[in-house]
C-alpha cells in the first residue's frame, strides 16, 4: 500500500517477495551480507507480522531504495533493544516511554547495517530517496505505537549515508565495534610471520597443541548441520547467562538454511563420533562473515579449540578460497585483535518522538565517549571495560 501523507512513490510492503529478485539485487550488490536478500528474508520468516519494507520507485517504476522496518516484541531485547542496551544501561536516566518500544530500521539481528539505496543514482538523489524512506519509517513507527526509531550497528558506509540526511550529529552514538581481518597472506605460515616473534611463537603453540589432540575437522552446508549447530550454539549462549534453547536456535537456523544455504559454510571439530565445536560462516561477495559459534566446553580438552576453529581455521578457509576479508563480529575483542584483527566502528542512531538526543544526557555522553575512545585506540581492554556496566 502507499504510505499515507507521503510521496506516492513510497510504498509499504509486507514481504520481500513483492520485490523482484533482480531489482533488489541491483541495490544489494557490493553491500553487507546483513542487508542481502537471503539474510533479510530469513529474518522475515522468523518474525512474520512484525516486519515491513518501505520501497521507493522513480517515475519510471524503477526501484531506487528499500528500507526494512522491524517493530514490536520481535525488535526488542538483547542487542536490538536500544533503550536497554545503549541508553538505560549506560547509567543515564531515561524515561522508558520516550524510547521503548521502538522500531528498528535497516537491518535486524546483524552487526553490519547500511541502507539499500541505488548506488548508481546521483548523490543528491540518493540523499532524497533515503530521506523519503526515513520519513515513511517515522510514520510507520507512529502507526504501530513505537516511541522511537533506531538504526543499529551501522557500518561506516551506513553511518555516512545517514549523516547525509540527519542534520544533527548528536543523534549518533557508538553502538559497538566489528572485528575485521584483512586476509593478506598466501598461507598460514605467511600469516604467522606477520607477527612479532613472541606473538608468532604463541600462535604456533596454540596450533600445535590443538593439532596434537587428534581432532578431525569437517565442514559442509548449514542445512546438514542444523540440529548439531543448534545444540552447541544454545550451550554457548547459556554459558554466558542468556536464555537459549536448542529448539529456538534450530528454528532460526532452519530459516537461514531455507534462504541462504548456498552462501553458508560450517566448520566443525569432531572428537571421535562427537562434534564438540562448530562455527557458522556465510560468504557473500568474497567476504567471510562469522555468524555464530558453539562449543561443548566440558568435552573440550582446553586445547585452544575456540581460537583454532573460529580464527585460525577460518583464516585457512579464506586463504584456500581466495577470500580477502573476514568479518569476525563483536565481542572477545582481546582475542581477535591479538590474532591480527582490527576494529571498525558500528554506530547507532535513536530518534524519539518525545525526547531529544541521548547525548544530551551528560552521563550517557561520557559513557559514549569512553566507547568511542576505546574503538579509536583499538585497546581491547579499554573496549571491553567500556561495555555494559
Image (cartoon, rainbow, N blue to C red):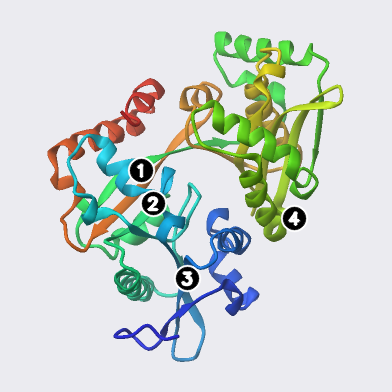
Q: Quadrant of residue 137?
A: bottom left
Give the labeled residue for mark 1: 175
How many numbered marks are there?
Answer: 4
Query: What kind of element bears circle 2?
Result: strand
* Spatial CA span between label 2 and label 4: 27 Å
Residue 326, placed above or below residue 302: below
Query: What kind of element bears circle 3?
Result: strand
Instruction: Between label 3 and label 1, give the one nearer the viewer.
Output: 3
Give the labeled residue for mark 4: 262
Proximity of marks 2 and 4: CB atoms separated by less than 8 Å: no
Q: Quadrant of the N terminus?
A: bottom left
- Mark toward the start of the polypeptide (3 vs 1): 3
- In this rendering, does residue 234 appear at all? yes
* Spatial CA span between label 3 and label 1: 24 Å
Q: Give me the disc on residue 152.
A: 2
Query: What kind of element bears circle 4?
Result: helix
Proximity of marks 3 and 2: CB atoms separated by less than 8 Å: no
- Mark toward the start of the polypeptide (3 vs 2): 3
Query: What kind of element bears circle 1?
Result: strand
Proximity of marks 4 and 1: CB atoms separated by less than 8 Å: no
Give the labeled residue for mark 3: 52
Q: 19 left or right of 99?
A: right
- Mark toward the start of the polypeptide (3 vs 4): 3
Instruction: Between label 3 and label 2, give the one nearer the viewer.
Output: 3
Residue 281, placed above or below residue 216: below
Bin the neighbour count of mark 3 within 10 Å (Cα to Cα): few under 14, some 14-19, many 20 and up: many
Amino acid at each position: 500500500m502507499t504510505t499515507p501523507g507521503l510521496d506516492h512513490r513510497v510504498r509499504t510492503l509486507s514481504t520481500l517477495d513483492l520485490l523482484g529478485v533482480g531489482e533488489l539485487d541491483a541495490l544489494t550488490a557490493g553491500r553487507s551480507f546483513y542487508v542481502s536478500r537471503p539474510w533479510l528474508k530469513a529474518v522475515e520468516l522468523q518474525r512474520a507480522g512484525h516486519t515491513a519494507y518501505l520501497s521507493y520507485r522513480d517515475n519510471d517504476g524503477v526501484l531506487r531504495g528499500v528500507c526494512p522496518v522491524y517493530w514490536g516484541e520481535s525488535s526488542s531485547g538483547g542487542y536490538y533493544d536500544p533503550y536497554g542496551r545503549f541508553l538505560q544501561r549506560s547509567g543515564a536516566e531515561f524515561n522508558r516511554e520516550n524510547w521503548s518500544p521502538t522500531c528498528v530500521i535497516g537491518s535486524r539481528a546483524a552487526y553490519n547495517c547500511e541502507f539499500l539505496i541505488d548506488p548508481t543514482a546521483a548523490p543528491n538523489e540518493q540523499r532524497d530517496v533515503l530521506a523519503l524512506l526515513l520519513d515513511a519509517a517515522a510514520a510507520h513507527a507512529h502507526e504501530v505505537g513505537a516511541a522511537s526509531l533506531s538504526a543499529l550497528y551501522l557500518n561506516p558506509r551506513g553511518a555516512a549515508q545517514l549523516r547525509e540526511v540527519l542534520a544533527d550529529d548528536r543523534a549518533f552514538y557508538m553502538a559497538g565495534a566489528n572485528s575485521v581481518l584483512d586476509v593478506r597472506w598466501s598461507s598460514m605460515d605467511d600469516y604467522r610471520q606477520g607477527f612479532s616473534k613472541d606473538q608468532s611463537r604463541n600462535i604456533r603453540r596454540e596450533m600445535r597443541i590443538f593439532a596434537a589432540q587428534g581432532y578431525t575437522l569437517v565442514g559442509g552446508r548449514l542445512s546438514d548441520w542444523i540440529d548439531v549447530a543448534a545444540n552447541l550454539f544454545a550451550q554457548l549462549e547459556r554459558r554466558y547467562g542468556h536464555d537459549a534453547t536448542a529448539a529456538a536456535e534450530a528454528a532460526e537456523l532452519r530459516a537461514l538454511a531455507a534462504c541462504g544455504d548456498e552462501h553458508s559454510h560450517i566448520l566443525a571439530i569432531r572428537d571421535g563420533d562427537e562434534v564438540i565445536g562448530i562455527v557458522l560462516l556465510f560468504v557473500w561477495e568474497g567476504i567471510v562473515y562469522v555468524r555464530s559459534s558453539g562449543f561443548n566446553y566440558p568435552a573440550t580438552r582446553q586445547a585452544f579449540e575456540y581460537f583454532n576453529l573460529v580464527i585460525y581455521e577460518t583464516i585457512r578457509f579464506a586463504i584456500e578460497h581466495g577470500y580477502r576479508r573476514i568479518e569476525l563480529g563483536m565481542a572477545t575483542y582481546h582475542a581477535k585483535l591479538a590474532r591480527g584483527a582490527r576494529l571498525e566502528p558500528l554506530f547507532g542512531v535513536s530518534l524519539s518522538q518525545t525526547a531529544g538526543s541521548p547525548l544530551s544526557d551528560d552521563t550517557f555522553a561520557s559513557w559514549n565517549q569512553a566507547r568511542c575512545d576505546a574503538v579509536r585506540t583499538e585497546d581491547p581492554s579499554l573496549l571491553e571495560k567500556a561495555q555494559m556496566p
